[in-house]
Image (cartoon, grey):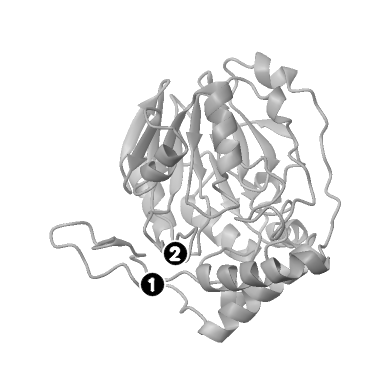
Amino acid sequence: MRLHRPRLAVAAVLIAVALPGGCTGVGGPQPGASVHHHEHGFVNTTPGDPRPGLWARVSFFASRMFATTFAPRTAAYPRVEHAGRALRENHGEPTVTWVGHSTLLVQLEGANVLTDPQWSRRASPFSFAGPKRFMPPAVAFEELPPIHLVVISHDHYDHLDATTVRRLAAAHHPRFLVPLGMKAWFADLGIVDDVDELDWWEARTVRGLTVTFVPAHHWSQRTPSDTNRRLWGGWVLRGRDRRLYFAGDTAYFDGFKEITSRLGPIDLAALPIGAYLPAVIMKPSHLDPRQALDAFADLRARVMVPIHFGTFDLAEEPLEEPPRLLEQLARERAVIDRVWILKHGETRRW
């Protein structure tokens, strides 16, 4: 343990300084460009809660780094064990499978799509420190069906994992759809030809699916020097008669209503519900279960699937609390039959 403390201290400081987020350093607006484009990066365009002070941010991220490394919490979530055969044999049914955290396997119109794939042990720039899985991926990487498309919401380590991306590129050669500013990161991994960058409201057609990048209220950063240099957002996948919205990571904002008004009714909304305490740190960029249900209502979606919980210890709420609180609130609002709290590895037809 003693050998690791010096480098852990350095890591904690780097994380504490690197992760606060915000718009500092992106310069002013670009004349003639969309309002979220600034000279050196991107900004949110909707009002949000103010960032906490520097000391609050440093204290929080340093304490989280220490806790997740030296005193990690654990929790046991229900899990569906399967060998992946049904997923590989599905060539047309619209299904969704929760692999864990924000990783979903979406099967639609014969296409197999992964959202924010994360199969690694930690969600961290360091192999020796930072949030570690307390639930393993519910679908083994080797059991995946052929992956045709991967969508990335933003560049945080629990959503964009270099090891997983390399494995997918080598084993499946999928098309990667990513936010503006991220193509260079993929090029550094040797992935050049199969990556498309999109701005908000831009779309691509992949294997019969229309895939649109939509706004979110969040931020981006992987190092101390690249705050908000890459865009962030969610994705809408549209087939012939199904629409799925994957929020990625976002605070509550007015944009949910605009997504539905622009792109039509949402059948399945995958909305984050975890990492919401302390609110002074998390509320400017994350949803809590109550806000996720508000977003669900704004979207006028048929079904909600919660994500961004039950896998990594990212914040201070009890690890088992997000789905319990979501279920309680969904019952109070009489929408419990439309809120699918999936088990790890569970597949549902939608």
Q: Are marks 2 and 1 in contact (CB under 8 Å)?
A: yes
Image location of residue 81, percent across then percent down:
83, 31
Image location of residue 176, percent across then percent down:
44, 33
Q: Is residue 213 above or below residue 229?
A: above
Farthest-out residue, front: 3
Looking at the image, which residue is at 59% across and 83% down?
A: 56
Image location of residue 3, percent across then percent down:
78, 65
Q: Image quadrant of residue 78?
A: top right
Front position in the image: 260 or 246: 246
Tell me, yes or no, if residue 265 can be seen here: no
Farthest-out residue, left: 32
Q: Image quadrant of residue 317?
A: bottom right
Please indicate whether residue 84 sits to the left or right of residue 73 in the image.
Answer: left
Front position in the image: 28 or 242: 28
* Residue that numbered label 1 is attached to: 47
Of labels 2 and 1, earlier in sequence is 1
Image location of residue 233, percent across then percent down:
43, 51
* Residue that numbered label 2 is attached to: 253
Q: Secondary structure at mark 2?
A: loop
